[in-house]
Image (tube, rainbow, N blue to C red):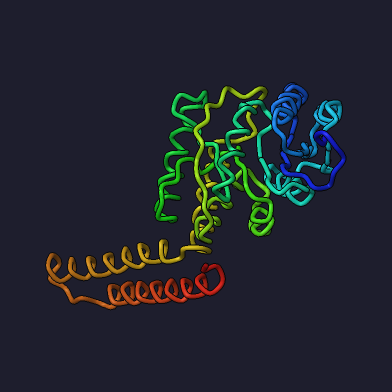
């Protein structure tokens, strides 16, 4: 679905990853099209069907949107990457297909894009989200804030606007799973790009949630640690090295003071390993500076 004309010079590409959203996708795309028609910008809407087993593809096609289909289910992140590759707009808007997000917020986010490289829709506290997910998001936000040295208000939000050139720059880093927002946020922060948050209220999703708390929660944590070691390795290596050093030193002190025994090689070995971990982190930080420093 292209707005107003058949021009190739498109301002905004809206990408919607879709997987078994047949109950919601038609009305969702129609609402987005109605909102964007109020603006003067040329836009396209791309629905990426990630191997749905219901009528998601036909329902999306019924709106006139541009529909791209995966032959089988690969993952939410994979659908997003497919959409980014196909996007023709200067700005990419990522929005879920379950109608949790209010399309009217897109216009406010696009206005902010005049000043920033990315705008993230940050869920406000009274959003209709599960309690367990809220607790998990707070943990992820705290860890990400530590890694980035700036406050991260909503690390896992799937509703965001980003310059297409930047999205494609980091495309190779994005995983095929739901954790792609985590990766792109940390990547932009480490590379010195500017991004901000726009408060949004989400409603209860239509249909069954695709995110499994334990499985995807562990994946989110692993993504944070992986990206941290890629972009800010000392944030991981220094605490690890310090913990090992204190463990070795404390164990040796305990043997000498409490057990009245010799200091022993075990403590020395642990403290030596701590030194090696620190040096590995130092080298990793230098490599990161050479590759990603701006």
Residue 21 appears in the figure: no
| Residue ID at (72%, 42%) | 12
Q: Is residue 41 above or below residue 56?
A: below
User: Residue 200, percent across and down?
Assistant: 52, 30
Figure quadrant of residue 208: top right
Q: Is residue 29 above or below residue 162?
A: above
**In the foreground, 238 or 103:** 103
| Residue ID at (62%, 47%) | 162
- Asked whether, in this view, residue 282 is left or right of residue 266, the answer is right
Q: Is residue 55 above or below residue 293?
A: above
Q: Residue furthest front?
A: 40
Q: Is residue 128 above or below residue 80?
A: above
**In the foreground, 272 or 232:** 232
Q: Quadrant of the N terminus?
A: top right
Q: How many marks?
A: 0
Figure quadrant of residue 15: top right
- Asked whether, in this view, residue 268 is left or right of residue 132, the answer is left
- Asked whether, in this view, residue 231 is left or right of residue 74, the answer is left
- Asked whether, in this view, residue 20 is left or right of residue 280, the answer is right
**In the foreground, 243 or 225:** 225
| Residue ID at (28%, 65%) | 247
User: Residue 255, percent across and down?
Assistant: 18, 69
| Residue ID at (46%, 63%) | 232
User: Residue 186, percent across and down?
Assistant: 52, 54
Residue 67 appears in the figure: yes
User: Residue 175, percent across and down?
Assistant: 65, 52
């Amino acid at each position: 679905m292209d707005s107003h004309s058949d021009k190739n010079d498109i301002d905004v590409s809206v990408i919607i990853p879709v997987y078994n959203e047949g109950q919601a996708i038609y009305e969702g795309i129609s609402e987005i099209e109605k909102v964007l028609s109020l603006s003067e910008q040329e836009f396209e809407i791309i629905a990426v069907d990630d191997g749905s087993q219901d009528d998601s593809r036909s329902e999306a096609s019924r709106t006139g949107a541009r529909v791209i289909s995966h032959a089988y289910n690969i993952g939410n992140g994979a659908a997003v990457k497919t959409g980014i590759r196909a996007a023709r707009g200067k700005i990419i808007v990522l929005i879920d297909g379950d109608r949790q997000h209010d399309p009217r917020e897109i216009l406010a986010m696009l206005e902010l894009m005049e000043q920033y490289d990315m705008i993230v829709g940050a869920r406000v506290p009274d959003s209709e989200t599960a309690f367990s997910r809220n607790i998990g998001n707070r943990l992820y936000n705290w860890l990400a804030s530590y890694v980035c040295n700036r406050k991260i208000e909503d690390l896992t939000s799937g509703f965001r606007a980003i310059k297409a050139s930047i999205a494609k720059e980091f495309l190779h880093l994005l995983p095929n799973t739901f954790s792609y927002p985590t990766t792109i946020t940390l990547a932009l922060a480490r590379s010195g790009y500017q991004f901000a948050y726009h408060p949004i209220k989400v409603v209860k999703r239509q249909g069954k949630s695709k995110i499994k708390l334990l499985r995807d929660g562990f994946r989110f944590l692993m993504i944070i640690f992986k990206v941290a070691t890629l972009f800010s390795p000392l944030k991981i290596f220094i605490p690890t090295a310090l913990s090992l050093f204190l463990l070795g030193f404390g164990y040796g002190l305990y043997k000498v003071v409490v057990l009245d025994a010799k200091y022993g090689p075990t403590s020395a070995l642990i403290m030596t390993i701590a030194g090696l971990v620190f040096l590995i982190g130092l080298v990793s930080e230098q490599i990161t500076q050479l590759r990603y420093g701006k």
